[in-house]
Image: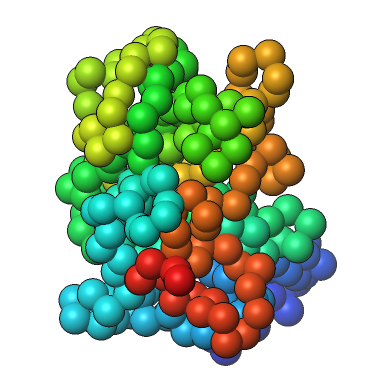
Amino acid sequence: MRRFSRWLNRPPYRWWKWCTAVLVTAGLMGLFIIQFGWLLSGNGRLNQQFVQWAGGDENERQELITLQRDACPGAPFILPADGFIGLLYADPRGPYSRLRPHQGIDIFSNAEAGVTPVYAAYDGYVTRLPDWRSSLIIRVPEDPLQPSRQIWLYYTHLADTAGNDFIEDAFPPGTDELFVRQGTLLGYTGDYNGDSLRRVWVQLHFSVVLDDGDGRFRNELEFDNTLNPSPYLGLDVSYACEPGEGCGVTTVCAP
């Protein structure tokens, strides 16, 4: 370290070397915030769960896993994958924010990519656009909680980091309106995150998306185009709950 300091202060190009060092340091800090920004904000209990998941052993992680293969009483959907529901709906923690909260839920797998099954949460019609490497969407013609409207169920991260998908062969790119029953195997969780510099844990991102009124799904990246999945799943999976109301406790059906 002392040698590096002498190099920085030694002419020539001392100013240029200092500027480069500052820029490199700022860049590394930026990458850290992108990857671990959730540590810097949010509900302390939820952050503690994240730390436990990130550094815990098999038994410690198991305590955080939700296993819910059947629909909760009074709820229409089944949980589409087993795992740690770590990022909740409307979650403002990094890489999200209060102005741009999380549009769905992230279910993290206690296994490597390509192992944890992903299921259809409800009856509907599967579409997979030709350029979708890790995603598919299910059209539900009648919202079971509000039958006057149509909704869509969006799934993503079903591929490895190189984009090799873990989606079942029955749903190749270009699939259009293929009917599936609730509980149909769709694929397996992965860690694909496109061209983003931010790596993700093995997971399923699941969201409930509104219809645009013309029979197409709205842009899932916009929070206002999505619905809180909690009443559909019968689980407390929304960040917007008061302390003491089960925030972060997503392992049992809600009363």
Question: Closest to the observer: 90 or 182?
Answer: 182
Question: Closest to the observer: 89 or 5?
Answer: 89
Query: What residue is at 39 percent from the left and 46 percent from the top?
Result: 77
When asked about the image quadrant of residue 6, the answer is: bottom right
When asked about the image quadrant of residue 55, the answer is: bottom left
Query: What residue is at 52 percent from the left and 55 percent from the top?
Result: 231
Q: Is residue 47 left or right of residue 217?
A: left
Number of numbered markers: 0
In percent of width and height, residue 165 lies at 29, 30
When asked about the image quadrant of residue 102, the answer is: bottom right
Q: Is residue 175 above or below residue 191?
A: above
- Quadrant of image for the C terminus: bottom left
In percent of width and height, residue 14 lies at 77, 69
Q: Is residue 184 above or below residue 21?
A: above
In percent of width and height, residue 34 lies at 59, 60
**Which colour scheme appears in the figure?**
rainbow
Q: Is residue 131 left or right of residue 119?
A: right
Q: Is residue 129 above or below residue 247?
A: above
- Quadrant of image for the N terminus: bottom right
Query: Could you tell me if residue 254 is visible in this image?
Result: yes
In percent of width and height, residue 42 lies at 64, 76
Query: Could you tell me if residue 161 is visible in this image?
Result: no
Question: Closest to the observer: 176 or 113?
Answer: 176
Q: Is residue 169 left or right of residue 96?
A: left
Query: What residue is at 31 percent from the left and 66 percent from the top?
Result: 66
Query: What residue is at 28 percent from the left and 42 percent from the top?
Result: 118
Question: Closest to the observer: 237 or 57?
Answer: 237
